[in-house]
């Protein structure tokens, strides 16, 4: 078994769960590789273990059985930029508050290994979206994809922007708003949800367009098929606006055409039978709880 381990930060209170994961992996003679920056942060945990390292540019390939992300949902989104189209299954160990992506409690970290070895899991394919900005704008390079959402939003102004929107070259509307979110089913429980968008099951073949604080109150979130190409053009009082891919942001000149479509590869998420999406949804949104008590 070949396992990659990644995290953006490390707190002393997380030492125990990192050691427990390493011990379980050592117990099954797994080959362990730690992201080079995270390796420096957890150096005190690694002295008794054998391991290799990796980065965004080297060390990972399709032979890995699992990619373990320590952190929250933001860390999981960053992990996707490492895995890219390699098809390595990802699981998130949550070291903070309950998230929709990083769902495995750190107290149960040993089960990440034991349940995987026992086959107590399924692989869920999660779709991504990608942005095309034209040859003169290479801000995102090869990392032009997002697991949660692609967002256009205002920059350096309190004034709203106008987002002219086309679906498969047919004009839809012009959103007068703070911005527009194009979210995947995975991203429907993120920024889009906080702006009034619907929750979409991860396996649904759809995208959702969610305006951010629209001035025209009849502008509602719209769910579309994920085989539709979206074309946007932004205008406003400032010269530039922002385009964000999950947590990565670029400043783009107004008037430039932005094309968004579903990526031609998926991300594999490990869903353990003990930690399902529906269970997370119930816990996160407090569904099924009697408020009278």
Image (spheres, grey):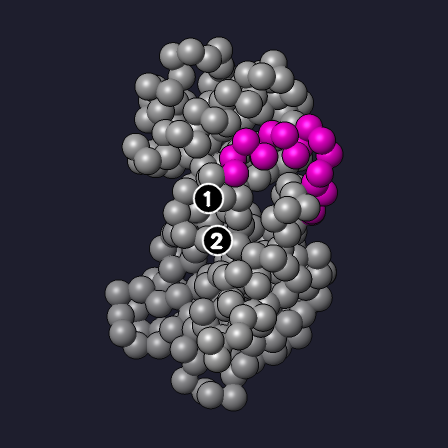
Please provide percent x and percent y for residue 57: 49, 25
- Which one is nearer the viewer's eye here, 89 or 115? 115
Please provide percent x and percent y for residue 292: 48, 80
Tell me which residue sits at (47%, 39%) in the image: 107
Residues under numbered marks 2 and 1 in contact, where contact means CB atoms less than 8 Å apart:
yes
Q: Secondary structure at mark 1?
A: strand
Any part of residue 141 in sight: no
Assess disc 1: are there few (<14), some (14-19) or many (≥20) residues with their C-alpha within 10 Å of its C-alpha: many
Which mark, residue 94?
Answer: 1
Residue 216 falls inside the magenta stretch: no
Q: Farthest front residue?
A: 293
In the picture shown, does residue 5 fall above or below 159? above
Please provide percent x and percent y for residue 166: 60, 72
Residue position marked by numbered label 2 in the rendering: 99
In the picture shown, does residue 82 fall above or below 126? above
Image quadrant where residue 38 sits: top left
Any part of residue 273 in sight: yes
Image: magenta residue range: 108-125
Q: Separation of disc 2 and disc 1 at Cα?
A: 7 Å
Quick check: 113 left or right of 226?
Answer: left
Tell me which residue sits at (40%, 29%) in the image: 16
Which mark, residue 80?
Answer: none
Tell me which residue sits at (59%, 38%) in the image: 90
């Amino acid at each position: 078994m070949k396992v990659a381990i990644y995290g953006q930060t490390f707190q002393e209170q997380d030492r125990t769960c990192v050691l427990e994961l390493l011990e379980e992996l050592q117990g099954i003679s797994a080959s362990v590789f730690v992201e080079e920056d995270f390796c420096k942060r957890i150096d005190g945990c690694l002295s008794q273990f054998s391991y290799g390292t990796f980065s965004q540019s080297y060390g990972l390939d399709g032979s890995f059985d699992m990619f373990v992300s320590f952190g929250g949902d933001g860390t999981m989104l960053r992990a996707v930029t490492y895995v890219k189209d390699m098809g390595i299954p990802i699981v998130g160990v949550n070291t903070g508050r309950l998230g929709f992506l990083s769902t495995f409690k750190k107290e149960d970290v040993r089960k990440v290994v034991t349940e995987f070895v026992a086959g107590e899991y399924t692989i869920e394919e999660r779709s991504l979206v990608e942005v095309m900005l034209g040859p003169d704008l290479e801000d995102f390079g090869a990392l032009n994809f997002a697991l949660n959402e692609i967002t256009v939003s205002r920059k350096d102004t309190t004034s709203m922007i106008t987002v002219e929107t086309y679906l498969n070259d047919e004009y839809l509307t012009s959103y007068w708003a703070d911005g527009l979110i194009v979210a995947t089913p995975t991203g429907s429980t993120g920024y889009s949800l906080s702006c009034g968008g619907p929750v979409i099951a991860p396996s649904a073949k759809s995208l959702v367009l969610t305006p951010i604080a629209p001035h025209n109150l009849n502008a509602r979130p719209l769910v579309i098929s994920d085989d539709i190409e979206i074309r946007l053009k932004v205008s406003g009082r400032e010269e530039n606006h922002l385009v964000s891919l999950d947590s990565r942001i670029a400043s783009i000149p107004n008037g430039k055409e932005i094309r968004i479509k579903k990526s031609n590869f998926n991300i594999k998420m490990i869903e353990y039978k003990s930690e399902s999406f529906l269970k997370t949804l119930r816990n996160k949104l407090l569904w099924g709880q009697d408020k009278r008590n």
